[in-house]
Each structure stands twice: as structure tokens, then as C-alpha cells.
Amino acid sequence: MWKGVLDLEKHFALYGAYHRNPVNILIHTISVWLIFFNSLVLFHFIPPLLHIPFVCGFDLNFAFTSVILYALLFVVLDKKAGSLGAVLCLLCWFGSQALTSCLGFSLAWKVVLTSQLICFTGQFIGHRVFEKRSPSLLDNLSLAFLMAPFFVLLEVLGNHFHYEPYPGFFASVCSKIEADRRGWQACKQKKSS
């Protein structure tokens, strides 16, 4: 049952099929983690599930719970890159908590709203203008929100540090991406004729 849900190669290929243009990839590399960070800022304002006063006023809130779930998912998908992803998630949590306490609600939501609008607009422009394909968000919401930060990280690690979760990972992913793109192109041509 879990094999399909945790099939990193399958999910990465599906995400990669929507992100082949270098400009679109750059836009996503910058904006996906900002969207994650901004979401955490907003999540800090949701009332906590549990307040532990003797641990520096720690709140078990939606922001912390989200970070833990993302971190665990990333580590389960790939131990090495996932561990780095988990550290990045925790850094985002610490940063979002600091920003939240500095700005307060009335200013934080304005900053986050502006940032989210810029990031999402950039991504939609990246898809419309450069990729010429709708975002994966429209076809697979869970893939877009749950996996996007990890896929951006994995793509950066692969492109700049030649990291692969296992030998042949990217070769296999590339063949799946090309098959998906051919199917998409055929479907697109069929609709236009």
C-alpha cells in the first residue's frame, strides 16, 4: 500500500514533467521554499494545540506539527536529502517563529500575503510563459503542496552537486518525464485539431 505513496521516482517524474524550462525551474527554486516559510508564519497564528510553559513557552501549534510531518516525509522518501530537507524545515520553523514574534499579526499577514502573491504569480507566469503547461497544482494538489519543497531541494542537489538517491535515479526519472511529456503533447495536439 505505502509503496505507491512513497514512490519517490514516480512522484519526482510527475513533478518534473511540469518543470522542464530553466526559467520556470529557477522561479520555483526561489519561490517554493518561500511559500513554505510564509505558510509557517501564518500557521503560528492558529491557536496552539498544546502550550508547554516550562520549555521556553513552546507551543505545539500547526506550524510545528506541519514541519514535523514534512520532515518525516522527506526522510522517509530519501534519508540523505530528506535529512537536509528536515533541517531546512526546522530552520524555516525557527525563522518563521522569530518573524512572527517580531512583526505581530497585523503586519505579518500583510508581509506574507504580499510575498505569497508574488511567489504564486511568479510560478503561474513561469508555467504560462516559459513552460507553456499548467502547473501540477491544477492536476495534483497534494503533490504540489506536499512534495514541491522536497523536489526543488532534490533538483538543486542533483543539478549542482550530482546527488542521486540511488544510482540511475535521474536516468529513470528522465525517461518517465519524456514519456509523460510525449503523452501530454499528443493530448494537446488532439484537443487543438
Image (spheres, grey):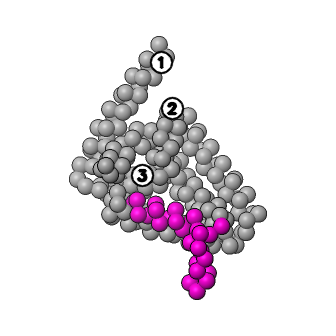
Residue 152 visible in the picture: no
Residue at left offset 56%, top offset 34%: 128
Q: From what the image shows, is residue 119 above or below residue 98? A: above
- Cα distance between the residues tagged 3 and 1: 30 Å
Residue denoted by label 3:
151
Q: Give the residue type at disc 3.
A: Phe
Residue at left offset 39%, top offset 41%: 14
Q: Give the residue type at disc 1.
A: Lys
Residue 98 visible in the picture: yes
Q: Which residues are magenta?
A: 47-74
The location of residue 85, given as percent across then percent down, is 43, 63
In the picture, residue 183 is in which quadrant? Answer: top left
Residue denoted by label 2:
132
Q: In terms of sequence position, does the residue under pointer 3 or pointer 1 come before the other?
A: 3
Decide whether residue 57 is among the magenta residues.
yes
Q: Which disc is residue 191 wearing?
A: 1
In the picture, residue 171 is in which quadrant? Answer: top left
Q: Are marks 2 and 1 in contact (CB under 8 Å)?
A: no
The location of residue 30, given as percent across then percent down, is 53, 53
